[in-house]
Image (cartoon, rainbow, N blue to C red):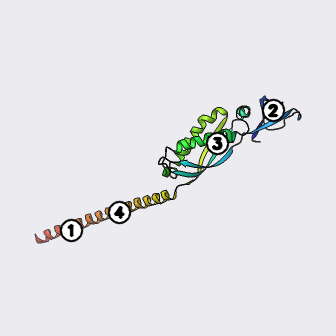
Amino acid sequence: PGEVGVKQRLGTLDTKIREPGSVLINPFTTKVVKVPTRTMNIEVELSLPSKEGLNVSSVISILYNIEQDKARDVIENVGMNYENILILSVFRSAALDVCAQFYAKDMHSGNRAVIEQKIKESMEGVLKEYGFQVEAVLLKSINLPKGLYRAIEDKLEAEQDAQRMDFVLQQTAKEAEQKKIEASGIRDANLILSA
């Protein structure tokens, strides 16, 4: 299950793709080359460049599969070492190109999904014609440079302080408005009493 086979007789590939199950062969002249069609996972550690020129270390997973009807083409055109020959090469190129368009903080924030999608689309553009289907690219771990972590935390603290000050200013303005209304009421009461 999860594999298809192609008969190879004296070095020549058969045109028929064999489904999972029994296949009769002559073991002296023929073998069955098995190609997995289930979802495969490659985990890659990579240092990604950011728009500002920082290197961000990351662990990225690539989920892909081979289209069943293209199994023979994969064996013939790419070979069984397709992960190293094709998938990882295309992934590295796509990841470096896409990540260079984003700031390091974007890789750690909500733009992460956008980056994953762009890498996936870039890979699909190349791999589709070879018979590979990229299911997902997942940024599992992003390690920003230590100085950048501190800068992001400082910025978040500053934003929270600014929001806190806005709240205090709004509260003070409301208290001033309340005192103004009270003073106006007391003045009106005094005018009525003096009349």
User: Closer to the camera: disc 1 or disc 3?
Assistant: 3
Mark 1–mark 3 distance (CA, rounded to whole Å) = 75 Å
User: Does dot 3 land on a helix, a strand or a loop?
Assistant: helix
User: Does dot 1 land on a helix, a strand or a loop?
Assistant: helix
Estimate how packed mark 4 is, as few (under 14), some (14 to 19) or many (20 or more) residues with alpha carbons within 10 Å: few
User: Does dot 2 land on a helix, a strand or a loop?
Assistant: strand
Q: Which three-letter amino acid code belongs to the residue tagged 2?
A: Lys
Q: Which three-letter amino acid code belongs to the residue tagged 3?
A: Leu
Estimate how packed mark 3 is, as few (under 14), some (14 to 19) or many (20 or more) residues with alpha carbons within 10 Å: some
| Residue labelled with disc 2 | 7
Vertical arrangement, residue 52 with respect to residue 70, above or below: below
Mark 2–mark 3 distance (CA, rounded to whole Å) = 27 Å
User: Closer to the camera: disc 4 or disc 3?
Assistant: 3
| Residue labelled with disc 4 | 165
- Mark closest to the chain's N terminus, 2 or 3: 2
Q: Position of residue 117 (x, y in %)?
A: 55, 42
| Residue at 48% in and 58% down | 147
Mark 2–mark 4 distance (CA, rounded to whole Å) = 74 Å
User: Does dot 4 land on a helix, a strand or a loop?
Assistant: helix
The picture quadrant where one finds residue 2 is top right
- Mark closest to the chain's N terminus, 2 or 4: 2
Estimate how packed mark 1 is, as few (under 14), some (14 to 19) or many (20 or more) residues with alpha carbons within 10 Å: few
Estimate how packed mark 2 is, as few (under 14), some (14 to 19) or many (20 or more) residues with alpha carbons within 10 Å: many
Mark 4–mark 1 distance (CA, rounded to whole Å) = 27 Å
Q: Which three-letter amino acid code belongs to the residue tagged 4?
A: Met
User: Closer to the camera: disc 2 or disc 1?
Assistant: 2
| Residue labelled with disc 1 | 183
2 and 1 marks in contact (CB < 8 Å): no
> Front-most of 48 and 31?
48
| Residue at 26% in and 65% down | 176
Q: Quadrant of the C terminus?
A: bottom left
- Mark closest to the chain's N terminus, 4 or 1: 4
